[in-house]
């Protein structure tokens, strides 16, 4: 299944990778690798994650306090946001 990363989600991903690399050299790369692994899991079972909106699902990172918000439309997974779990849920949009 095709994955589409919205520009706002791409920006949040870059910010998180940069933040973790600033904390410890290489930690941002580990964050990115976990992101890629989660995307691969979502592609295998797109409906397997918790619904948090009418069409939105969320997938939690295991090692980092982040989540991936996405919707499934036709034959595509659209990543709408990558969000820190300790921030207010209104800071990211659910569809």
Image (cartoon, grey):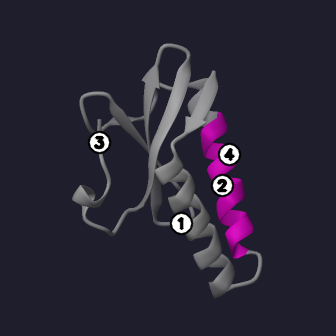
Whole-number angstrom distance, CA of label 2 to CA of label 1: 9 Å
Tell whether label 2 touches label 4 (CB within 8 Å).
yes
Q: Earlier in the sequence, mark 3 or mark 4?
A: 4
Name the residue tied to disc 3.
94
Q: Earlier in the sequence, mark 2 or mark 3?
A: 2
Name the residue tied to disc 2.
34
Q: Report crowding for label 3: few under 14, some 14 to 19, many 20 or more residues within 10 A (C-alpha).
A: some
Q: Earlier in the sequence, mark 1 or mark 4?
A: 4
Q: Which of marks 1 and 3 is nearer the N terminus?
A: 1
Which numbered dot is residue 64? 1
Tell whether label 1 touches label 2 (CB within 8 Å).
yes
Q: Is residue 67 visible?
A: yes
Q: In which quarter of the image is residue 80?
A: top left
In this rendering, is residue 24 above or below 34?
A: below
- Name the spot of residue 37 as percent of width and height, x first: 68, 45
The magenta region covers: 27-40
Q: As drawn, which residue projects farthest toward the top?
A: 74
């Amino acid at each position: 299944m095709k994955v589409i990363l919205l520009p706002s989600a791409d920006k949040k991903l870059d910010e998180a990778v940069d933040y973790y690399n600033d904390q410890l050299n290489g930690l941002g790369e580990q964050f990115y690798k976990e992101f890629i692994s989660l995307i691969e899991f979502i592609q295998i079972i797109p409906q397997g994650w918790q619904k948090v909106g009418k069409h939105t699902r969320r997938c939690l990172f295991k090692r980092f306090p982040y989540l991936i918000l996405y919707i499934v439309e036709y034959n595509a997974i659209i990543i709408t946001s990558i969000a820190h779990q300790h921030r207010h849920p209104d800071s990211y949009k659910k569809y």
